[in-house]
Structure formats: structure tokens, C-alpha cells
Amino acid sequence: MRFLRTWLEPRTLAVVLLALAVGGFVVVAHEVAAGDTLDVDRTIMLALHPQPDGGGPMWLQSMMRDATALGSTLGLSLVVCLAVLFLLLSRRGSMALFVLASALGGILLSTLLKEVFSRPRPDVIPHGDFVTSASFPSGHSMMSATVYLTLAILLIRLADTRVQKCYIVGAALLLSGIVGLSRVYLGVHWPTDVLAGWLAGGAWALGWWMVAELVWGKRG
């Protein structure tokens, strides 16, 4: 029984969460493609910006720009590179490859999804950040979920207690959550773009969680 709890529990949880994330993304994507989310998206964005010009307190705008940098290409690239270098110095080449493959695969998936849906950026308020790609799904939200949750997968293998593991996962979710909310506040993504990004990034990270469990099991 101890063996079954140790070996099956994380894998069962990963499969269930993965199915929920993928299913959630499919539902959101279908609704977005049908145009059924536009009213809700606009309502949420306008609720965040009651001023006609879409502005807000300067301190809050500055804070949101700082927060969105946590999911920027440069910010996440630095995090991934530093993590990969540390793992290589620690002679954990397979884990370094794990992090790199998850991040690069996430970028490719995000780019592909944006090309497939080609959703225009919001036009409700002036953009608070420079953007060039399509809107759906949010690349910042998806990649922050991918990178931070992938690193959390590795860190929880070093944690001794359930409380520590919950803290690590919670921190990763908090970081990706802050990034997604900042994208909506800055007016560069619809709320459903961010929701889809979280779901897609979470599903991608969960897939790599299953890989980690199969490859390393309880080994660090």
C-alpha cells in the first residue's frame, strides 16, 4: 500500500489536473472562437478602468508594468538560463535538459496557438505595454505558468514536508497569477486570453511533471 500511495498518487493527481486544464482550455478557446466571450471581456476590462482614458493611479500603472516584467521574454529567459546553469554546475544534466525542453517547447506551443487563433488585441483602453503578436492566448501568462511551475516541480522534490511543497507550488501560482492580471490591467490582453494562457501553461507544466515522475520517481 505504501508503494501504491508513493508511486500512483502524484501520477493520478497529475493526470486529473492535466485533463482539467486541457478541457478548460478547449472550452475557453471554443467560446472565444465563437465570439461569445467579448461582452464579458469588455465588462471586466472596463470595470478595471472606470476612467474614460483608461488610465489609473500612476503608482498602480508603474506596479503593473513591473509585475508584467516577471513574465517577459527577458525575465523568464534569465530565470531559465540561471536555473539551467545551476543544474549543470550541480551535475544534474538531465534536470537541466528538463527545464530547457519545457521552456522551449512552451514557446513553440504559445507561438503556434497565437498563429492558429490570430485574435486581435483589445481596443477598449490604450495599451500600457508594447505588443506585436496576436492576443490569444496570453504568452506572458502561458510562459510564466510554464516556467515557474516547471521549476516548482523540481523544487518540491527537495522539500521535506507537505507544507513546504504547498508553499513552493503556491509561490509559482502567485507569480504567474500576478503576471496574468497585469496583462489585463495594462489593456494588452482580454481576460479570456489570460485564462487560456494559464490553462495552457499549466497543462504543459503538468505534462512535464508526469515526465519527471516517470523518470526520477522519488529520486532527487
Image (cartoon, helix red, strand yellow):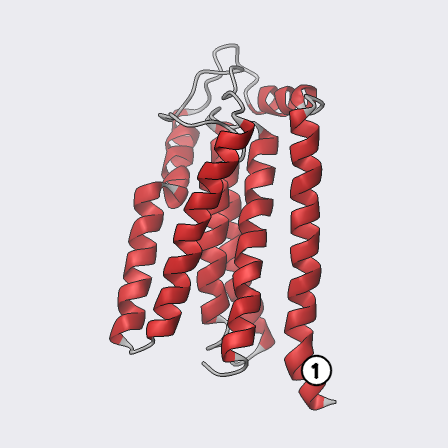
Residue beneath disc 1: 5
Q: From the viewer's side, name the closer residue of 156 and 163.
A: 156
Residue at the spot x=69%, y=32% of the render? 30
Q: From the viewer's side, name the closer residue of 26 and 202.
A: 26
Q: Quadrant of the N terminus?
A: bottom right
Q: Position of residue 69 (x, y in %)?
A: 36, 40
- For residue 58, what is the image quadrant? top left
Where disc 1 sits, the SS reads helix
Question: Is 59 left or right of 50, judged from the image as shown?
Answer: left
| Vertical arrangement, residue 218 with respect to residue 67, above or below | below
| Vertical arrangement, residue 77 with respect to residue 7, above or below | above
Q: Is residue 179 visible?
A: no
Q: Position of residue 203 (x, y in %)?
A: 59, 53
Q: Position of residue 34 (x, y in %)?
A: 70, 23
Question: Is 162 left or right of 219, judged from the image as shown?
Answer: right
| Vertical arrangement, residue 131 with respect to residue 174, above or below | above
Residue at the spot x=41%, y=38% of the render? 68
Question: Is 73 left or right of 207, judged from the image as shown?
Answer: left
Q: Position of residue 52 (x, y in %)?
A: 52, 10
Badge 1: how crowded within 10 Å, few (<14), some, or many (20+)? few
Residue at the spot x=71%, y=61% of the render? 16
Residue at the spot x=50%, y=76% of the render? 215
The residue lying furthest to the top in this view is 52
Q: From the viewer's side, name the closer residue of 101 and 158.
A: 101
| Vertical arrangement, residue 203 with respect to residue 11, above or below | above
Q: Amino acid at mark 1?
A: Arg
